[in-house]
Amino acid sequence: MTLLNLGNISKRNGLRLLLLLLFSAASISMLSAAQYGYLISDDSLCSIWWAEGAYKIMKDNPLPDVKTERVTLFCAINEYEPFQLVLLPKKRMEKVRIESSALYNVSGYKIVPENISISHVEYVTIITPTDEYGAAGEWPDPLPPYDGPFTAFAGENHPLWITIHVSDDANPGIYDGMVIITSGTWKKEIPIRLNVWNFALPEETHIRSAFGLNTSFIKAYHNLETREELEKVYDSYAQNLKEHRICPTSPFDLYPLKVSVSGVNWEGGEFISDAVHAGQKALKIIDDNVSANVQARYKEKIPVQADVSYRLTWFARTEEENQEYSVLVSAYNAEGEFLPAQNKLRVYKGTKEWKQEAMEIGGFSSEVKEVSLHLFPTFRDEIGSQKGTAYFDDVVFSPSTIEENLLQGGDFEMDIDSMSVEVDFSEFDRGAKRYLDEFGFNSFNLPLQGLGSGSFYSSQEAIFAGFRQGTAEYDKLLSEYLGQVEEHLKENGWLGKEYIYWFDEPDAKDYPFVRKGMENIRKAAPSLTRFITEHKPGPDIMDVTEISCTIFHRVDPKIVADLVKKGREFWSYLCTGPKGPWVTLFIDHPAVNLRIWLWMSYKYQLKGILVWEANYWTSGTVFHSGTLQNPWQDPMSYTVGYGTPYGQVNHWGNGDGRFLYPPNRDPNKDKKKYLAGPINSIRWEILREGIEDYEYLWLLENKIKKAKGKKELVDKGRQLLNLPESLFKTGQDYTKDPKILLEYRAKIAELLEKL
């Protein structure tokens, strides 16, 4: 370790940094010195030991003292059960191969090798610890699948992560098989015994979840080009989540609702009724995005003739004097193909007062059959770097020789009675049938337009089809829109799985805005489920919200219990916070964290878990366009958004929002197309173990409810469901020893067999 030069910082801060380094070094030394697992073979070439899939095995963990003849596992039907087989070579081992036999029980039923997966445990190098409870060094996390011979180096552990899937048609009982490891003439057969309990985990998962899957990251890291490729790879990711009993937050990113509004002739901007040029309405366009050209456009293409000259006139004003704005007329041929060389674009200087402008367009070539009209509030450059606000009114597109406006609604005066909404569900249904019906996801964020958005940092007012929340047009159109969505979900059996997550972590200052939005949803569609993430749980906003999701270290079990009695639902979430000593999701924190999160969720009556993203592989704040972070080499999750300037390096924590790895290990140089799914992580596997533990608790609770004449067993079950302080006292005071959880789970399983 390189010592820091403390000469240029204060003694107090220098001492704190030095203590932090010493604490981190001590923490990783303790992890490396921890002894667990079972020694199964030891010869002059290699020692072999194993441990349950509940640990993070460091490269220098010592050999366990406890010896055993075989790997011994316990699990239910319809469950995944992992373990780690660890090679500790005394000499470098080349061309190491590993394979698993089938597992057989006495009845002849077998668990086939196809249901036994083998992966390497790989290490990432942590340079900056997440916090004082983390540590620099090499930490186990990625689990790339075993795909052939490998080299195992002398003097360091080489764990293999092996997962057995007991399918739902398996018989209970004892299964025996073996794992065979070879290197040249050296060969070891490691006996495996699996005890399958005589109960099955339910197909349906009883805790809900929301883990983001960023499709743009999938496309970039897999080097995908077509929608078909993206759909195929996304489906592999969704399949992975299904196997881990986890739901993607937005499975409909690729399958959106298509909303069309008739009676409104413009798209983009906002129709305003104050400070207009004439009549009742004008169009306001705000460009506050430095990476896009914000615009409003006339929705329909306008037919034109080659032998006719045209003229465009309008009134405009701008927020700033002499602010440049742009007007564009784009051309298309008979087949609807865009003809960029036929564009007519002009830049104008606006004033703070209304001013009429004109564009003499002249004639078009014979190839041009239609044109489209676009209004930009700023100078239109390649990346949309300009910001500004402009207003337009009384737009006229006409042949030069006659006074005829070819635009309907060029004056923005529209009859509310002629407005209506139509929702096309065809793409949405394609996704829903796959992911709700076939995959059985029990929750999804319902993608809706026109609800506003934001967080404690900033917020955006609700605008639908150009009309702001609070206007008669907004209320009419939103009611038609949400009413159709609500009815469609009900007809297809999907109602109740949805939640509307449109605002994130409001502060008290945001509550009036959030309340109004929630009330609009309820007024338009009484059965749709409203959702909010909060800094703290409480009644302040829960009276207009069905689901509250609170950052974990601010969950108040008493408040939750009181509101659960009133029919509310609570979830919790982890992200860059909390940090240690709380339960966390970080790579350089205890292995037990993500598993015990689910035990605590059961205890506190929480019905869902959320993490903002599962594949947050790069930060646009730190890595410029065209460059991608390599998560295989850099495990840190860097801040993005919330006002962070480009180039500023802020740390969220190692592995925050990142449970899956892309198969591409060198995304900036390797441009091969990857059509496979993701690479798992240890934390991802441990999270599944926690979700399966939750199912054990759910099963026991329901067995107790149905048990008759078994008072002694029922009493014991109730005692087990009252989870003891040996597991955890609070979210920051919990056992770090997975063995305690495993032993407690075994007690639950034994009672379930009796019940």
Image (cartoon, grey):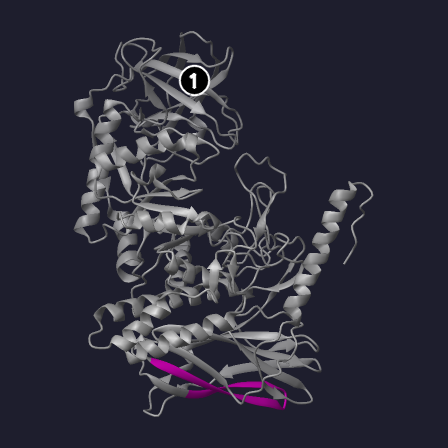
Question: Whole-percent x and y of residue 260?
Answer: 26, 35
Would you place residue 188 above or below residue 509 in this image? below
Question: Which residues are drawn in magenta?
Answer: 176-197
Q: Nearer the viewer, residue 727 or 345?
A: 727
Q: Nearer the viewer, residue 437 or 575?
A: 575
From the image, give the main secondary structure of the stretch colored magenta.
strand
Question: Whole-percent x and y of residue 732?
Answer: 52, 56
Displayed quadrant of residue 245: bottom left
In the image, farthest residue toward the right? 7
Q: Nearer the viewer, residue 71 or 233?
A: 71
Q: Residue at x 35, y 18 (%)?
A: 283
Q: Nearer the viewer, residue 570 or 418?
A: 570
Would you place residue 734 above or below residue 488 in this image? below
In the image, farthest residue toward the bottom? 106
Would you place residue 206 above or below residue 323 in this image? below
In this picture, residue 585 sits left or right of residue 649: left
Magenta span includes 184: yes
In which quadrant of the rendered image does the N terminus lie?
A: bottom right
Q: Residue at x 23, y 19 (%)?
A: 414
Q: Residue at x 56, y 43 (%)?
A: 639
Magenta span includes 669: no
SS at circle 1: strand
Q: Is residue 677 visible?
A: no
Callout 1, which amino acid? Ala
Disc 1: which residue: 390
